[in-house]
Structure formats: structure tokens, C-alpha cells
Image: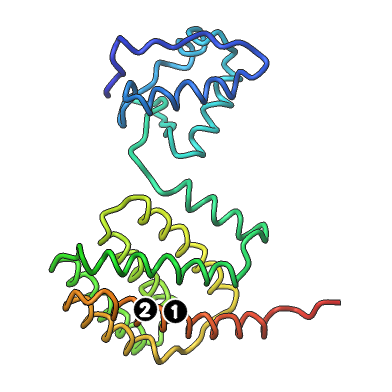
Amino acid sequence: MKLPPATVEFSAIAAPRAVDEIESQIRAMVAQGLLKPGDRLPSERDLAAKLNVSRNTLREAMRTLERAGILEMRKGTHGGAYILHGSSDSIIDGLSNLYHLGAISPEQLTEARIWLSEIVVRVACERATEEDLRALDENIQAGRQAIADDRFDIRQRLHREFHLILARMTRNPIIEATMAGVMEVMGLFIERIGPSENAFTEPARDRLMKHLRKRDAEAAVKEMTSYLKRLQTRYLDQWAERRPPEH
């Protein structure tokens, strides 16, 4: 258990925006490096006293920071509030919530995936290692096995993971997190429209791999964009067929 350094001093909070001020103070400490991943905050009683707030107010702020992916609330002997390592969970949850609320349309979702994938593939061509390419190969082979086994659930998960592997190849956590959020929502969308047979996926994967190995960014981007636009048309057609008629 690692406690923050003694130099970290919390300031008393004044109502009525106590919850917001607690969040801002802790976020600022993380941004400044005063609180680091793995650090445990003072106990609820001690921290409430330092901030001059009630424990209920503190708990509300802690819950908000937990939902934002800043803190992890642990139970047990070594329980308490811990600063988390970076995570894309908050981005994934945010995009998923927008989708469930109807703020992201299928057209916007599939369009965003095309645009983001163009960036990912271009950078992946420059930064991919042999280990990265092997990971893609393994994913493709597993996907083919899922097709042979008639396991749509596994196939569609592997196809989404293919894009996550590509995003990791950029070595950019912002791109990785954004792609993770987009692919999570894509999974929700695919669940709603149901299974489909996309025989053009595997040949497109093979062509893309050739371009990646040659470090031919233009050809790789063209291949990915062409594939995703074709898939977009298929998905939107399925969506239109399954959507109940408007009255």
C-alpha cells in the first residue's frame, strides 16, 4: 500500500459546490503528479476532516471520480480510495451511454469508424513490429476458425479485436482509447442488427496484411477504407430492415 507523500496537502472546501471542488482538487493533484497511480488517499474520516466536508459529501465526490476512472474504491484490509492507472473505461462508458440514449446514429457510428481507421492504418504502417503483425495474423486465423465453426459471436468479437490490435500499433493511448470506445459501440450495434455473412472480410484482411508488411500506407488505407465503406452499406441496410416502421 503506497500513501501519497507528506507534501500533499488538501485544502478545506467551502459549500455550496463542495462536491465539484473536491473533484477539481484531486484531479489537479493527479495532473500535477502530486498523486500518482497506486497512491491511496487518506481514510474517509481523515480526508473529510482535511477538506472540512461531511463524509456523505466526500463519498459523493469519490463516486463521481470512480465513474470517471480516476479512483478505484477497494474493500477489505487494504481498502480505501486508490488513484488508478490510465484506463479507457470512461471513454468506452461515455460513448456507450451516448449510443443507448440515441445520441449516436448508426450512420455517425460507421462513418466515425471509417475516419478513425484511416488514421490508425496509416500510422500502423509506420510503427508496426513483427510481433504486431503476428498478433494480427493470429487474430485472422482465429476468425477463420470461428467461421468454420459457425460461431458468429466469436467471429464478430475477433473482427472487432482486429481493429483494437491495429490501434495499439499506433502507440498512442488517445487513439487506442477512442478506437476501444468506437468498437464497443460497434459491438452493441451489431448485436441489434443481428448476424450477417460478409464473405469479403477475409480477402480484405489478406490484402491489408500484404500492404502492412510492405509499409505501403496509401494502399493499406485505400484497402481499409474500401472494406469499411462496403461494410457500412451492409450494416445500414440491415439496420433499415430491422428498424420498426415510423407511424
Looking at this rendering, what residue extends furthest in the left direction?
130
Tell me what residue is drawn at x 24 percent, y 73 percent: 136
Residue flagged by tag 1: what amino acid is it? Leu
Disc 2 designates what residue? 224
| Numbered label attached to residue 122 | none
Quadrant containing the C terminus is bottom right
**Are discs 1 and 2 less than 8 Å apart at CB?**
yes
Residue flagged by tag 2: what amino acid is it? Met
Quadrant containing the N terminus is top left
Q: Position of residue 98 (x, y in %)?
A: 61, 55
Q: Position of residue 40 (x, y in %)?
A: 35, 23
Dividing the picture into quarters, in which one does residue 225 lie?
bottom left
Residue 182 in the image: above or below residue 64: below
Q: Position of residue 128 (x, y in %)?
A: 19, 65
Between 232 and 39, the one nearer to me in the picture: 232
| Numbered label attached to residue 228 | 1
Q: Label 1 vs label 2: CA separation?
A: 6 Å
Q: Is residue 139 visible to us here? A: yes
Tell me what residue is drawn at x 42 percent, y 16 percent: 43
Circle 1: is it few (<14), some (14-19), or many (20+) Cα within 10 Å?
A: many
Dividing the picture into quarters, in which one does residue 87 lie?
top left
How many numbered discs, if any? Answer: 2
Residue 178 in the image: above or below residue 147: above
Considering the numbered disc 2 on the image, is that residue within a helix, a strand or a loop?
Answer: helix
Considering the numbered disc 1 on the image, is that residue within a helix, a strand or a loop?
Answer: helix
Looking at this rendering, what residue extends furthest in the front direction?
218
Q: Is residue 77 visible to us here? A: no
Q: Position of residue 147 (x, y in %)?
A: 36, 87
Between 104 and 81, the one nearer to me in the picture: 104
Between 212 and 139, the one nearer to me in the picture: 212
